[in-house]
Structure formats: C-alpha cells, structure tokens
Image (cartoon, coloured by chain):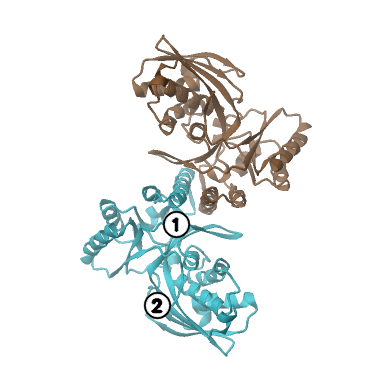
Chain colours: A cyan, B brown
Amino acid sequence: MEKDQKLREIKLFAPATVANLSCGYDVLGCCLDNVGDEMLIRKNDKKQIRISKITGQDLPMEADKNVAGVAAKALLTALGESQGFDIEIEKNIKAGSGIGSSAASAAGAVFGINKLLGTPFSNIELIKFAMEGERLASGNAHADNVAPALLGGFSLVKSYNPLEVLSLPNLPELRMLILHPQIELKTKDSRSIIRQNLELQKAINQWGNLAALVSALYTKDYELLGRSLKDEIIEPVRSILIPYFDELKTLSAANGALGFGISGSGPSVFAMCKGDKTAEKLKAEFQEFYADKNIDFDLHLSKINSEGIKVL
Amino acid sequence: MEKDQKLREIKLFAPATVANLSCGYDVLGCCLDNVGDEMLIRKNDKKQIRISKITGQDLPMEADKNVAGVAAKALLTALGESQGFDIEIEKNIKAGSGIGSSAASAAGAVFGINKLLGTPFSNIELIKFAMEGERLASGNAHADNVAPALLGGFSLVKSYNPLEVLSLPNLPELRMLILHPQIELKTKDSRSIIRQNLELQKAINQWGNLAALVSALYTKDYELLGRSLKDEIIEPVRSILIPYFDELKTLSAANGALGFGISGSGPSVFAMCKGDKTAEKLKAEFQEFYADKNIDFDLHLSKINSEGIKVL
C-alpha cells in the first residue's frame, strides 16, 4: 500500500465488456481479453482531474463531461481526497459500439486512481464510482459493463438497491466473437425502444434460462450454456436496429456457436463459441458475409478475461 | 433390472415439495424429507390401473380422475405396456395445502411402476408422465413439484418446450419450516389472480435474485441464498389470500430465518432457516402466534431431501 502511494503514475489496459448476454438483460456481463483501451493516469499538483489527452476517438476533454473524469471525481469525493490526476486515454474501443466503451474509461480511471492512492477501495467497491461515468454516458448508472471490467470474468448484478455484484466462474474454452457494424445507435435510443411491460410467461422463460446459464458456468457445461443463451424479450425488438442480425444468428448456429445475441444495447453482436477452431471458422464466415454489405465493421475474437483491468 | 421385474409390489415414501421459492416462480422447487405420503403399488392381473385404497384424504378412486392413476396411465401408454397395477395411497399431505400433494401421488405412482417394470425410464424421464397428474389436478402440467419429488434436492425447470430440468446442489444445513393454515385455496384460483403482464424492471429484479440464488447454492452461501429469496411479482398479490402472511414474514425475519415466502400457490408458507436451532425456535414462534387465530394449521419442520422418493 505504501509502495503504491509513492507511485506517481500507472498505465493500464481497460477492457471491453459484453453486457446482457441474451437472457441476462441488465444483470449479466463478461470481460474481453484483447479488446480495450490503454490509459495513463498520473498524479498532478493542481488538485484537479484533467483529461490531458485522448487519442483514437473524439470525446470531451472537459472532466465533467468525460466519463473517466466523472467517475474519478466520484471516487475522490467519497474519499474526501484533494489529490489531482491527469488522465490520458488511448481509445481503441469505439464509442457507441455496444462493448462497453464508456465503462472501460470509467472503470480504468477509478481503478488507476485507487491504485495510486494506495488501494483504499476493493475492486468491487469501485463499481459504484465507475457507474457515475455510465450515468453520464447513457443517463442510466448501470453496472453490467463496469463490473466485469473491474472484476473480470462474468459478473452478475444481483441488485442495485443495495448494489450487490457477484463474480461467476469463467469457462476457459469460451471465445467471444464480436462483430461491430459501424452504424450509429445511441444507448439512450436503444433503451427507449424497449417495452416497459412484458408477458409473465416470457419473464418466466427468461429467468429459467438465466438460472440455467448460472448453473452451466458452475458445472462447466458448455452445451447447457448455449441452450440458455436465449432472449424472447429484448432481442426481438432491438435486433431490428442491427443490420443482418437474423442472418448472422443463422450463420452462428450453422457453424456450431453456442449462442448469438446483442452485445449490450448494440449495434455490436456476439457469438459465443467453445474453442479457437470454431471461433476462427465463424470469424471467417462473418468476415465473408459482411464484406459486401457496404457497412464498415470491426471483428474481434477474444477469450473471456478473468482478471479485468490489467496494469501494464 | 431382472430382479426388479420379478418384484410384485413396492412400498414408497412420496415426499412433499415446495415450489416457486419466492424468486423462482414456476421454475424452482425443493423436496422435503419427513413430510409425505406412503404408497403401495402392486402388479395385478387385470391389465388396468386401479386405485385400490386411499386413506387420510377423500380423493377420487376412479383411476382417470385420480392424479396417480392418470400419471400411471401416461407412463404405461408410452411403454405400450398392458401390465396392470393396484395403487394404495396413505395420504399424509393434505390436498390443496400447497406442498405438492398431487405431485407426490403422481410422482410416486410413476416411480413405483417404473421400478416394478425393471426401470425402463430414468427419474428425469419420469417427470413428463407425473406432469399429467398435475394437469388433472390444476389444469396446468407444471413440473416444479414433480421434478423435486422425483429427483430430490432443488430442481430447476429450465424450459418446457423442450422439457429440461436441472438438479441444483443442496445445502445440508437448510431447514424448511412449513405452516399450512387450513383454509381452502385451489391452485386454479390462486393462479387466476396472477397478473399476466408485469413491469420489465420487476422482472429484471426477479431474475437477478434467481441467478444469485443459483449461485448461492453452488457456493454454499446461506446468507446470499437468504438475500435472494425475494419476490416482487407474485407474493404481493397472492399473499393477500393467506391469513397473517405479513406477520409471519416479520416473525421469520426477527428470528433469523434466511427467507420466507409462499409455498407453491399457497396457502402454505415456508420459512427457510440455517440449522436446527433457528428452525426449532421459529417453529415455536409460529406455533404460539397461530394458536389463537381460530384457524386450524399444521406445522412441519424438515431438511431438504436430497434423494426424492424413497423405497421403504
């Protein structure tokens, strides 16, 4: 702790995350391993949070309008701490992609500052500060991206009042294939098309699947995990906004993916696969399918990152 | 198997079960250990199912109107089997109590006949036949009582189409205290007061709790299990039909129960406790509280039965 407090700066990998995961709407998320931002956080002697540099994306430099700045301030306020910090962000995750771009910045900022202050908070305690960044980004202080970014693996947001987040087991052979079609889709808009009422029977189906998914993670049952990745509630509405969603889903099933769904509020989609071979094959299929659709897109293939944010 | 086929009769303990368990509405159930019926099933040479004796309750003796008879016939039809059986039932579980009275009879009948025929089906395969008894009893072929009666422990009904049931881990120190206020409450009526639509946010809260409950069973986290036993959807409506529900819930919390809720569709209620001491104390509190309420009642205190139906 004392050693950390003497640190003047820290360099981090802040990972992308996939929230919702079909049946886990608003409560489940997982952490990606090789997709994420780099952040450099440095103590300054100005007693203020400054976003000193952002590369890769055009985002607000004013701390109060930047998710990293807002999250950092929430942490410092809770501590009654006047130490200032400069935050540099090399954004590799595109804003609005649906793989936790704002969460990575918010989680990275609080993680780094916490380290530089001698780790007064556990990672699980940092979630609530990072959520303030999410509130700025989308109007909704959700935890299903910042929690897996901070904790790694799979996170379950059991409840918000009080905030209670559980870490669920990771399955080592899982691979997440992410396709990000570069259309504009704001989290706010994507939330607003969701119906606020639903049929009880659909809710029952959904919680049966989510309960089975949790069981599958504990029993390392990849097939059951796949059979549980269903969503009759959100996906039928939101998938309309995502170009070629149904075709990609069909392609995933035909190529042996365990499941396929919307990442967060989209427009990114994920295919969950067991093992590199299936995932690489499906990546090639996605690449070929999307190549002639006149939509710019990114493809990411990643393990589940059990660690969360990494110090570089 | 050959040995079993030569058996002419079998005597069984068919356990009571608690379905729903707050956040697990329609998908979760658990099996009780010392509350249940006794059944004697015997091959006859009449090529028919006969309910030859029922003691303890006034129930239909005609096989087509008796849940055990209907379940037995569903099993025999699937096998194309013409062997007949006599079924004697000593009912200790009161019909309409909400602790799986019909499920015990249906599950016991198919379990016993399956044994006497040399075990052509696994217990998990027997569920669908026992569900036919539930269809007769309540108009709804639900599995959340017959599954734990047949499998023991905690059962999760992941889906009905196709039928998929998972066994979840048991926690050895769990105790279920059941209070059955002897008011009449038909499953059909108790289902009909449930609203068929609900707010998305309540559904999210419910599936967050159910996912946490499943995690708690795997991690043997009794406290988390308790924090997960919540139900904002069904309990607020159904509890109105149960005399002194709120008072019993308050009493449970004050005496250290992990959780309290409606058993199945009521009128029985359950308090889940850790350890005998807490459970015995709460049993005495329930006894004292209900003693002057001018309502006949039964109190049962039981472990979770990991085995399900037992051959006597």
Q: Tell which of A283 and B154 is nearer to you.
A: B154
Give SS at disc 1: loop
Q: How much space separates mark 1 and mark 2, taking CA atoms?
A: 29 Å
The disc label shown at residue A136, or none: none
Which subunit holds the residue at mark 1?
A: A
Q: Quadrant of residue B71?
A: top left
Q: How many marks?
A: 2
Q: Tell which of B98 and A201 is nearer to you.
A: B98
Q: Position of residue A260 (x, y in %)?
A: 34, 55
Residue depicted at x 57% and y 78%: A73
Observer-side mark, 1 or 2, equals 2
Q: Quadrant of the C terminus of chain B?
A: top right
List the residue tagged with mark 2: A91
Which subunit holds the residue at mark 2?
A: A
Could you tell whether B297 is left or right of A291 in the image? right
Give SS at disc 2: loop
List the residue tagged with mark 1: A194
Which three-letter amino acid code belongs to the residue tagged 2? Answer: Lys
Q: Is residue B65 visible?
A: yes
Badge 1, how many Cα within 10 Å: few under 14, some, many 20+?
A: some
Q: Earlier in the sequence, mark 1 or mark 2?
A: 2
Image vertical order of residue B154 relative to residue B139, above or below: below
Image vertical order of residue B212 relative to residue A149, above or below: above
Q: Position of residue A280 (x, y in %)?
A: 26, 61
Residue depicted at x 38% and y 59%: A262
Could you tell whether A169 is left or right of B289 in the image? left
Q: Quadrant of the N terminus of chain B?
A: top left
Q: Is residue A98 visible?
A: no
Q: Tell which of B165 and B111 is nearer to you.
A: B111
Q: Tell which of B254 and B160 is nearer to you.
A: B254
Which three-letter amino acid code belongs to the residue tagged 1? Answer: Ile
